[in-house]
Amino acid sequence: MARAIGVVFALVVVTLVYLYPDNAYLWVKALHVIAVISWMAGMLYLPRLFIYHCAAEKGSVQSETFKVMERRLLKAIINPAMMVTWAAGLWLAWRTVAYMDGWFHVKFLAVLILSGIHGYFSKAVRMFAEDRNAKPARFWRMMNEVPTVLMIIIVIMVIIKPF
């Protein structure tokens, strides 16, 4: 359902950009912010699921439920939100020539790292699905903070533009 809503919204934005090209920047920016919020929500929730999954006995009903939750969160929300974030963000950077500014370089690096963490979480979903997670709950508690720190850096760069 979340994927369908995202696709419909993206189609609406593309249509509005086509019909009202003078407002394209604002529509793409709105799409970018919505996608970022969705991506971050998933990136903050997924490691929390891993923490709880660590406590579930392998093969138990609870463990199998976590596997479904993790897979659906990744496939239906986090992956599509990341793709829209990147697509809209790159268009915005090109449109505004922000890629020339120092603040953007720091933001871009933080987004690259966040994307790497996303990939690491994707691998963890596969490992949990195969009952091969070797990391303790404490590790996932620490990893739960990484997206938060990156988000803070990104928001400060975008809003404050310190350099």
Image (tube, helix red, strand yellow):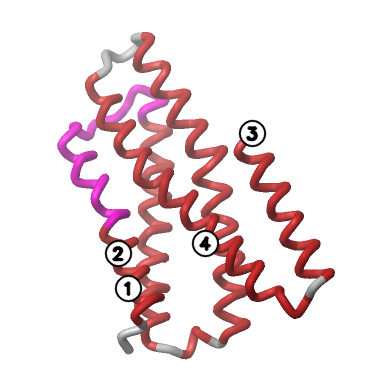
Left or right relative to 85: residue 18: right
Give the residue number, with chain letter if any, for mark 4: 33
Earlier-in-chain disc, 4 versus 2: 4
**Mark 3 or mark 4, which has the lower sequence index?**
3
Three-letter amino acid code of the residue under disc 3? Met
In percent of the image, x 36 and y 68: which residue is there? 155
Label 2 sits on what residue type? Ile
Spot occupied by residue 30 in the image (x, y as percentages of width and height): 59, 64
**C-beta proximity under 8 Å, tags 3 and 4:** no
- Give the percent coordinates (x, y) of residue 4: 68, 40
Give SS at disc 4: helix
The residue under label 1 is 156
Judge the density around disc 3: few (<14), some (14-19), many (≥20) Cα neighbours within 10 Å. Answer: few
Identify the image quadrant of the C terminus: bottom left
Residue linked to disc 2:
152
Kindly report the distance in space between the C-alpha atoms of the residues bearing marks 1 and 4.
15 Å
Q: Does the magenta stretch include residue 140?
A: yes
Disc 1 and disc 2: Cα gap in Å? 6 Å
Front one among 94 and 60 = 94
Q: In which quarter of the image is residue 56?
A: top left
Task: Check whether the beta carbons of the residues at disc 3 and disc 2 lie within 8 A of each other.
Answer: no
Which disc, if any, is residue 30?
A: none
Horizontally, residue 24 falls left or right of residue 73, namely: right
- Per the image, label 1 sits on a secondary structure element best described as helix
The crowding category of the residue bearing disc 1, from other C-alpha atoms within 10 Å (few below 14, some 14 to 19, many at least 20), is some
Q: How far apart are marks 3 and 4 (CA)?
A: 20 Å
SS of the residue under disc 3? loop
Is label 1 in contact with label 2 (beta carbons under 8 Å)? yes
Binning the other alpha carbons within 10 Å of mark 2 as few (below 14), some (14 to 19) or many (20 upward) gives few
The magenta stretch spans which residues? Answer: 128-148
Q: Tell me, for residue 1, which label it has, or none.
A: 3
